[in-house]
Image (cartoon, rainbow, N blue to C red):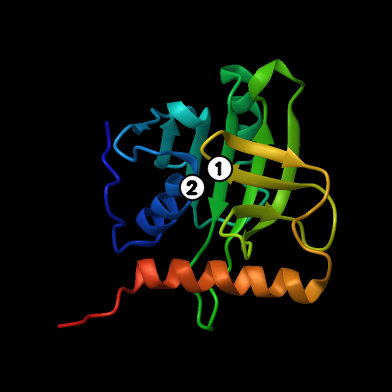
Amino acid sequence: MIPLLKPANTLPGALHYYVAAELLKNLSIITSWPGGGMPADTVILPAARVILSFTCVTGPMFRNKVHDLACDSAIDVILLRCCLTPGDILPVTADVTLAGGGLAPFDMHDLSLYRHRDRTLWLVPEAFGGAIRLGHGGAELCLVPPYETHVERADGLYRSASELAALLYPSKTN
């Protein structure tokens, strides 16, 4: 068991904490995922029925592994991709295969982290289309994204990036 009671000041640690905090009520119930060709930073969140993984390798690397793992384990798999780059925003994308609940696997690629005004966390497409709401019930596919305009989408991406940056680079207060 890997306790994620507070975010680590590493990119994988901050991303795992940021997303796992949305999916779980108890962050101490997380176990590492052994091998299977997935990146080393892979954990299973049993209560949310989600496998969460991190890599700084660009797509399409690991997409087939994500799909196969989701199909073999009948659980949703989220692969977060991010590398520290110069600039103001951490470019985080996600590849997801939804395979829980006994339904046929459904793949979505190049999704972005989005924080809605109502504080829910989403994985959203580049424009409009299906989106994934992340919550205590796991990953939920929604056919309509949580925004109506590109400006609303950009606001949510900036909210999410700001929260993630605060976890990665905590301010020092006395």
Q: Amino acid at mark 1?
A: Gly
Q: Which mark is residue 22?
A: 2
Q: Is residue 38 visible?
A: no
Quarter of the figure that contains the N terminus: top left
Residue 65 in percent (x, y) is at: 60, 33
Residue 146 in percent (x, y) is at: 74, 57
* Circles 1 and 2 in contact, beta carbons < 8 Å: yes
At x 45% / y 66%, what residue is drawn? 164
> Is residue 83 found left or right of 148 in the rendered image?
left
Q: Is residue 117 above or below residue 46?
A: below
Q: Which residue is mark 1?
A: 135
Tell me the element at label 1: strand
- The answer to which quarter of the image holds residue 18 is bottom left
At x 83% / y 70%, what residue is drawn? 149
Real-space Cα distance between discs 1 and 2?
A: 5 Å
At x 57% / y 62%, what residue is drawn? 92
Q: Is residue 4 above or below residue 10?
A: above
Q: Is residue 162 above or below residue 52?
A: below
Residue 152 in percent (x, y) is at: 74, 72
Q: Earlier in the sequence, mark 1 or mark 2?
A: 2
Q: Is residue 93 above or below residue 134?
A: below
Quarter of the figure that contains the C terminus: bottom left
Tell me the element at label 2: helix
**Residue closest to the eye, 15 or 55:** 15
Q: Is residue 140 visible?
A: yes
**Residue closest to the eye, 83 or 163:** 163
> Is residue 11 found left or right of 118 in the rendered image?
left
At x 40% / y 39%, what residue is drawn? 25
Count of number-bearing discs: 2
Q: Amino acid at mark 2?
A: Glu
Q: Residues within 10 Å of mark 1 (few under 14, many from 20)?
A: some
Residue 135 in percent (x, y) is at: 55, 42
